[in-house]
Amino acid sequence: MATSTANPSAPAARPRLADKYRNEVAPAVAKQFGIQNKMAIPRVTKIVVSMGVGKSIENRARIDHAARDLGAITGQKPVITKARNSISGFRLREGMPIGLAVTLRRERMYEFLDRIISVVIPRIRDFRGLPRKLDGRGNYSFGLSEQSVFPEIPLDKVEFVQGMNITICTSAGEDGPAEALLERMGMPFRR
């Protein structure tokens, strides 16, 4: 019987993008904006991935399938968001499940961002770059129209095409340093 020689108490390897941030991106951004204090250098703090599953009102299975797909994509169990108000025109009652959300931090955040930059975005058909539109406070949001661009989702298992929103939150308080940070990390913005 073979035994594993790996030490279970050994620290896991740091994500590739975390090392790139520490060794290349942070010094370059600090130099570009004249930041002396290394704690003031902008960094990615969290990534929020959310899906609105409004069609789950008609078909309850859609929320389960979307939760399974979002869990496979992010590696974390999604939180089900529920309706706050009742809207009779949409046949929506307060408390009905209408969406999913996952917040990624630390290693999972860097691994997810690395997969977005190096695997997912190149798989988008007719891709011409992401728009350079940040929210004014250094956060960047963009949407994907279907979950099948992720390699974790087998195309033959997709029952419902479901889009998602991805928000990258940074510690920069303004758009200039945040845009420079994301561009140096590899986000393919339009020229």
Image (cartoon, rainbow, N blue to C red):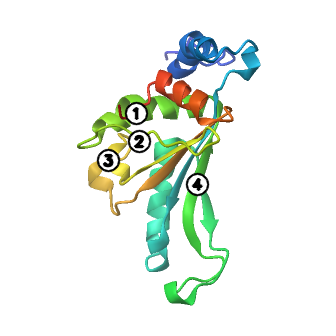
Q: Quadrant of the C terminus?
A: top left
**Residue that badge 3 annotates:** 154
**Residue that badge 4 annotates:** 101
From mark 2 to mark 1, how far is it between C-alphas?
A: 6 Å
113 vs 152, left or right, is right
- What's under tag 3, amino acid-wise? Pro
Q: Residues within 10 Å of mark 4 (few under 14, many from 20)?
A: many
| Callout 2 touching callout 1 (CB < 8 Å) | yes
| Residue 187 position within the rendered picture, expressed as x and y whole percent measured from the top left | 44, 30
Residue 58, placed above or below residue 142: below
- In this view, the residue farthest toward the bottom is 88
Query: Does residue 6 appear in this view?
Result: yes
| Residue 62 position within the rendered picture, expressed as x and y whole percent measured from the top left | 44, 68
Could you tell me which residue is drawn at 64 percent across and 15 percent down? Answer: 30
| Callout 4 touching callout 1 (CB < 8 Å) | no
| Residue 26 position within the rendered picture, expressed as x and y whole percent measured from the top left | 61, 16
- What's under tag 1, amino acid-wise? Phe
Secondary structure of residue under mark 1: loop
Secondary structure of residue under mark 4: strand
First reached walking from the N terminus: tag 3 or tag 2: 2
Q: Quadrant of residue 45?
A: top right
**Residue that badge 2 annotates:** 131
Residue 83, placed above or below residue 30: below
Depth check: give the residue in front, 8 or 90: 90
First reached walking from the N terminus: tag 2 or tag 4: 4
Depth check: give the residue in front, 110 or 166: 166
**Residue that badge 1 annotates:** 189
- What's under tag 4, amino acid-wise? Ala
